[in-house]
Amino acid sequence: MLLSLVACSGSSSLPDTSQAPGFDLDSATLALARLNHYRTLASVPKVQLDYDLSRDCQKHANYLKINSVDLRVVGLQAHTEDPHAVGYSAAGAEAGGSSVIYQGVTAPAAVDNWMCTLYHRLGLLDPNLLYVGFGSGGGYQVMDVVRGRVGLPYAVSGEALCPPPGMPDTPREYKVEIPHPIPGDEVLGVPITVEFFGAVGDNILNVQTQLTDLAADQAVPCYVQWPGEPFLREWDLDRLIAIIPKQPLAGGRMYRVTVQAWVDGTPWRAEWDFTTR
């Protein structure tokens, strides 16, 4: 997956109802609705479906299907295409490098699962993400979350908390991804993230966090990442504070997240609750 911000033109390729869309429109529509469900919970504007990006995503999904690519085996290479392989296209390869990818689930389930990861969740709640592309085929789900994003200097500044404040029915567990943030420990709670966007979050220091099980009135042991203190050395990400409970969360409980830090030289604090399913 790619996490860099890029500028987009601010216009989307609109549907042409006179011809077939060139991608799985039904799956794309379901995925879009699911992503916008989470964005609405986070008080972030909804995204739209870009048909050109979706055609490219479909090409990459088709490439993965034709070549029977196993994401668990190839890892991050699933975002690339071999120019000598059957089904290769430059457009599909570009989409693969700009997308999050899931294998073996439906389109809306892929969105749900991405939201239960750490790295593949990042940017899905970015207010500067205006358009996404989506392709689906053979159990492969491909969503372009990079090329429809507005970059600096036009990006809106803000932050995204996830799980969103007040979210009901929050999943309890982390979904394993590649790369995996906590080597040797895959039985974890759903990640909690604070992302900063635009001109905010260049400098994050003195981070303090607490996750509290309100029913038990107990602090939950967690792993914590912030710039300069990453889980993985090669994944030291700017503008991110990440909290991962060391065990799956209890079901039917309300949890409170408290995060304090110095952000761009100013004290910053957030506190919010969510409820597990």
Image: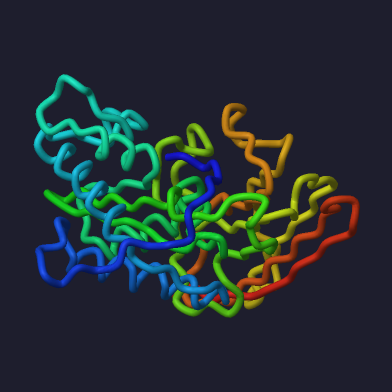
Q: Taking 229 as reference, is 39 above or below it?
A: below
Q: Nearer the viewer, residue 273 or 44?
A: 44
| Image coordinates for residue 131, horizontal then vertical, percent | 41, 61
Q: Nearer the viewer, residue 128 or 188?
A: 128
Q: Residue at x 45, y 48 (%)?
A: 146
| Image coordinates for residue 42, horizontal then vertical, percent | 56, 73
| Image coordinates for residue 122, horizontal then vertical, percent | 52, 52
Q: Nearer the viewer, residue 244 or 240?
A: 240
Q: Taking 109 as reference, is 144 above or below it?
A: above
| Image coordinates for residue 6, horizontal then vertical, percent | 53, 45
Tell me the quarter of the picture where residue 107 sits.
bottom left
Q: Residue at x 42, y 75 (%)?
A: 37
Horizontal side of 102 relative to 44 (left or right) equals: left
Q: Quadrant of the C terminus?
A: bottom left
Q: Quadrant of the N terminus?
A: top left
Q: Residue at x 54, y 41 (%)?
A: 4
Q: How many tags in the picture?
A: 0
Tell me the quarter of the picture where residue 173 sits.
bottom left
